[in-house]
Image: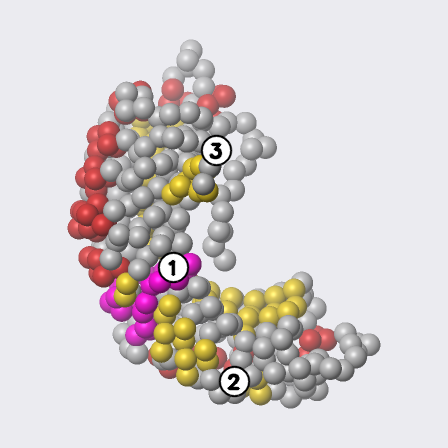
Amino acid sequence: MASDSCYLDNSSYPKTESWNKSVDCCSWDGVTCDDVTDYVIGLDLTCSWLRGALHSNNSLFLLHHLQNLNLFGNNFTGTHISPNLSIFAKTTHLNLSCSHFSGTVPSEISHLSKLVSLDLSYSYIYESNGLSYLGLEDPIFTMLAHNLTVVRRLVLDFVNMSTVSPKSFVNLSSSLTHFSVRDCSLKGIFPIAVFQFPSLTTLDLSFNEDMLGILPKSNWTGSLAYLSLFFTSFSREIPDSIGNMKNLTVLVLEVCKFTGHIPSSLGNLKQLQYLYLGRSNFSGVLEFEIFTKLKNLQSLSVSQELNLTYDRLSYTFPKHERLRLRSCNLTKFPYFLNSLEKLIYLGLSSNRISEEIPRWF
């Protein structure tokens, strides 16, 4: 599953501690130079303990030939993202995540038309009244969507996008493979067309409670491997066509507003490792047999009345580590639990189990 926080490895020394002005900077840790021109083309300052303001006159902005800039995991609290970023016209990879930038994303970032990967996630600062998040306004996002024609990875988790219309997502590059807008205060209707982007492998829309949407009945992109709609307002039924998504390894449809029956076609998703279906408004009785077809399943969450045989031994989950059967109308401890040798978490709350805990348990 995707991480929901920034992990800073403070156990290692910052890359800059190895920098020695008496030797060629191309040999410094985190610095990459062009083999022919010796221009600095890559700068990786991940978790380098950098603190304080990053002003527009910083020498960083003299590196006009940069193709890769990674400032992940530093502390630029109180600093706005500089409009001077526009000088990095050759940049293909830009990572400013987890570095506590504030204010709003400048329009100049949309000038970086060669970007293949852009990560602005988890940028926030602590204020007396709570957290203040980096903001991305609708006109700037519109320019991003139009100008970043080759972008494949776009990560904007925890960026305040409350003024951005999800409808503008259809203008993103058709080459997009990874799109994550987790907890961005998005509102409005999510366009079905995004599910049909030909190269999309990861789509994370979770924690956008006011974002509406439905799942497509056909023409999904076959490449999708990770889909999370956790805590959104997606609704209506889950279509049978979801069973055609044979590359899915993670499917999170929990705490949504889905209705109707959970389709049996989920049993076709042989690559699934994580499946979360709890706390929606599904109806009917779900055949537990569906899940026994998913031999790679490691984690399952369901809150739906189940049709299962309590003493059946053939329900096998060889890789199962986490199981939550909440509000499933269980009346006994299912005996198949006895075979889950790798289980580290079990949730059976809000059922109707009244018997004593069995000895085998």
Q: Which residue is mark 3?
A: 47
Q: Residue at x 31, y 44 (%)?
A: 135
Mark 1 or mark 3, which is nearer to you?
1
Disc 3 on helix, strand or loop?
loop
Q: Is residue 324 above or below residue 165?
A: below
Q: Is residue 209 visible?
A: yes
Disc 1 on helix, strand or loop?
loop
Find residue 132 and report its image quarter: top left
Disc 2 on helix, strand or loop?
strand
- Whole-percent x, y for residue 160 in the image: 34, 48
Residue 208 shown left or right of residue 348 in the figure: left
Counting residues from the N terminus, which is met first, the one under dot 1 or under dot 2? 1
Q: Amino acid at mark 2?
A: Leu
Mark 3 or mark 2, which is nearer to you?
2
Counting residues from the N terminus, which is met first, the one under dot 3 or under dot 2? 3
Q: Residue at x 57, y 84 (%)?
A: 306
Magenta residues span: 191-216
Image disc number at residue 208? 1
Image disc number at residue 109? none
Image disc number at residue 286? 2
Quick one: 133 or 149, which is closer to the camera? 133
Find residue 54 and report its image quarter: top left
Quick one: 15 or 193, which is closer to the camera? 193
- Whole-percent x, y for residue 250 in the image: 46, 65
Residue 38 shown left or right of residue 284 in the figure: left
Q: How far is the residue under mark 3 from the one under mark 2?
A: 47 Å
- Whole-percent x, y for residue 100 in the image: 41, 36
Which residue is farthest front? Answer: 129
